[in-house]
Image (tube, rainbow, N blue to C red):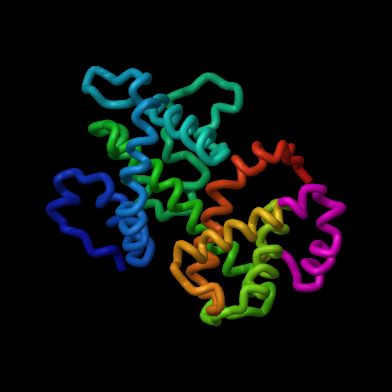
């Protein structure tokens, strides 16, 4: 089923609610919850970028401006270069931001919602922030799916409460697959053990990366307000991988790490 929203708000043109209504019920509700926490930050971060971009005669942003604003924001804030936003050295064209690869993982109703809004009546500042939040939400959903596959690879149930040592082992699995650009669901249990035993040789910055992921895990634990001696819930590990997604690019930059395609 679809997420429950006020039909009058959707019909009146609230883009945030339109996107949520186009998702399935679970994703739509999670998206609205994330918007409560992150929408204001997204709007503020985009203000200086959008202020420098032209609007069309209707006072809205055309597709190239929307793509530029979100590319600039994600590249600078998270080190993300999303296919479809990144110009890869080419001039910005009129292709729709709905062509971004991340959005292809969502239902066609979400893509149609974005395309319709962008062409009629066009995007204002709030709409650009909603689309940015949509991309970020999708990336977090994909991270959760990779984490679930990491749990499966370690033969651990996501419903289990775990000791911190077990979570650290799971994060090593997640990060090894992430760095090697392999989905955990495509790796066998025997293969992941071989990979982990060789990661320091495969990826020289593996020890620094392990320390960094442990710091993020500690941060997620503090945010969850759990005591340090309590077992770890899946939601805390989910928040850890969300932080990994958001901060891995800046972490590489700070550490002077040159990411190599392997």
Residue for point 32% across, 26% down: 61
Q: Nearer the viewer, residue 236 or 95?
A: 236
Q: Look at the picture and state if 85 lies above or below 218.
A: above
Q: Give the vertical position of 16 relative to 80 (above or below).
A: below
Q: Residue furthest front?
A: 228
Q: Residue 261's quadrant in the figure? A: top right
- Number of marks in the rendered image: 0
Residue toward you, 252 or 117: 252
Horizontal and vertical percent position of residue 100:
49, 40
Residue at screen point 81% across, 62% down: 195
> In the figure, 170 relative to 101: above or below?
below
| Residue closer to the observer: 102 or 221 | 221
Residue 213 falls inside the magenta stretch: no
Q: Is residue 143 left or right of residue 181?
A: left
Q: 10 above or below 66? A: below
Spot occupied by residue 188 in the image (x, y as percentages of width and height): 75, 70
Tell me the residue at 64%/74% (across/down).
Answer: 152
Q: Nearer the viewer, residue 241 or 18?
A: 241
List x then y, in percent, for residue 24: 35, 63
The quadrant holding residue 164 is bottom right
Residue at 84%, 52% in the rendered image: 202
Q: Pick out the residue farthest to the left.
A: 8
Q: Where are the magenta residues, as a range? A: 186-208
Counting from the top left corner in percent of width and height, residue 155 is at: 67, 79
Assign the magenta stretch its main secondary structure.
Answer: helix
Q: Quarter holding the N terminus?
A: bottom left
């Amino acid at each position: 089923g679809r997420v429950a929203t006020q039909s009058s708000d959707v019909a009146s043109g609230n883009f945030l609610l339109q996107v949520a209504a186009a998702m399935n019920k679970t994703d739509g509700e999670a998206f609205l919850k994330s918007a409560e926490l992150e929408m204001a930050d997204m709007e503020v971060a985009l203000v200086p970028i959008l202020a420098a971009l032209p609007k069309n005669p209707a006072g809205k942003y055309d597709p190239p401006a929307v793509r530029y604003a979100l590319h600039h924001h994600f590249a600078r804030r998270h080190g993300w270069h999303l296919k479809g936003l990144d110009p890869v050295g080419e001039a910005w064209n009129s292709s729709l931001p709905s062509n971004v690869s991340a959005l292809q993982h969502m239902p066609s109703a979400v893509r149609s919602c974005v395309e319709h809004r962008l062409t009629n009546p066009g995007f204002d500042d709030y709409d650009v922030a909603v689309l940015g939040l949509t991309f970020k939400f999708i990336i977090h959903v994909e991270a959760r799916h990779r984490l679930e596959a990491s749990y499966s690879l370690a033969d651990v149930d996501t419903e289990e409460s775990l000791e911190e040592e077990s979570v650290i082992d799971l994060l090593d699995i997640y990060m090894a697959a992430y760095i090697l650009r392999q989905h955990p669901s495509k790796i066998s249990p025997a293969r992941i053990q071989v990979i982990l035993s060789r990661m320091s040789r495969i990826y020289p910055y593996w020890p620094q990366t392990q320390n960094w992921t442990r710091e993020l895990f500690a941060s997620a634990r503090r945010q969850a307000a759990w005591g340090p001696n309590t077992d770890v819930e899946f939601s805390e590990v989910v928040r850890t991988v969300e932080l990994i997604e958001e901060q891995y690019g800046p972490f590489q930059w700070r550490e002077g790490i040159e990411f190599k395609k392997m």
